[in-house]
Image (cartoon, rainbow, N blue to C red):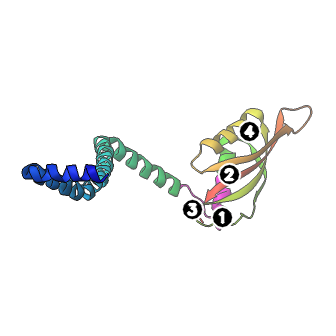
Amino acid sequence: MSVLLAQFWAILRAHPWISAGFLVAALAGGANLPLWRERRVIERDHDEVRRRGQAMLVALTDRARIHGDEVLLASAEAVIDRNLISEENMEVNLGYFYRLEKLTRVQLSRIDQLGSIPPEPGTPFRTVPVSLQLYGSYRNLLAFVRELETGPRLVRVRNFRIERADVSGSEMSVTLMVEMLAKP
């Protein structure tokens, strides 16, 4: 090993300019190592910023559709807010069903607004259960249910039972359990 080292020193003394070039290259390589690591970090950051910029460009080019969706969503929220019920205002809530009774020509024999379950924390709405018992022809009873589903109030039919009211006639009886969407 010492022979090789002695030969290497001899070559360095014989060629001082080459030796100086090797020394400068070694020092520059050592100084470049932290810069090389920093360059890798900067490349990753640049790629992330470029990806976010491309996503933003896609969003900007799709701005008209997004704005249209916002307008549609705002109008849907307004419709929902207009058609929410108040649990305390029972006569208005049940009056809705009486109007449907007259519209569809059925006989509403029993209607009960039941107590609602407290909503979960963070839930913007609550449901108010209502029990209904109706009599009428099959066609009129189905028209009543259709009006419930397509009417302005936000109603979900939970239970539905239909049976013949009298053996000989065409009268049917329907028992419904519905939930109306209400303000908390």
Q: Which of 164 and 161 is in front in this view?
A: 161
Q: Position of residue 79 (x, y in %)?
A: 49, 52
Q: Which one is closest to the eye, mark 1 or mark 4?
A: 1
Per the image, the residue denoted by label 3 is 124
- Which quarter of the figure is the C terminus placed in? bottom right
Q: Where is residue 14 in the image (x, y as percent from the top left)?
A: 9, 50
First in sequence, mark 3 or 4: give its number.
3
Q: Which amino acid does label 3 sit on?
A: Pro
As shown in the figure, which amino acid type bears the numbered disc 4?
A: Leu
Task: Find numbered disc 3 in the image and state the secondary structure of the residue it sits on.
Answer: loop
Report the residue at 20% width, 54% height from top: 26
Residue 184 higher or lower than 95, as above or below: below
**Within the magenta stretch, is there residue 126?**
no
Q: Mark 2 points at which residue?
A: 97
Q: Mark 1 points at which residue?
A: 119
For marks 2 and 1 on the same chain, the one whose residue lies earlier in the sequence: 2
Residue that appears at 31% across and 44% down = 63
Mark 4 sits on what residue?
A: 141
Determine whether label 1 and label 3 are within 8 Å by CB.
Answer: no
Instruction: Give neighbour class at mark 3: few <14, some 14-19, many 20+ (Cα, 10 Å).
Output: few
Task: Give the residue drawn at x 34%, y 47%.
Answer: 67
SS label for mark 4: helix
Q: Nearer the viewer, residue 105 or 50?
A: 50
Closer to the camera: disc 2 or disc 3?
A: 3
Magenta-colored span? 83-98
Q: Tag 2's secondary structure? A: helix
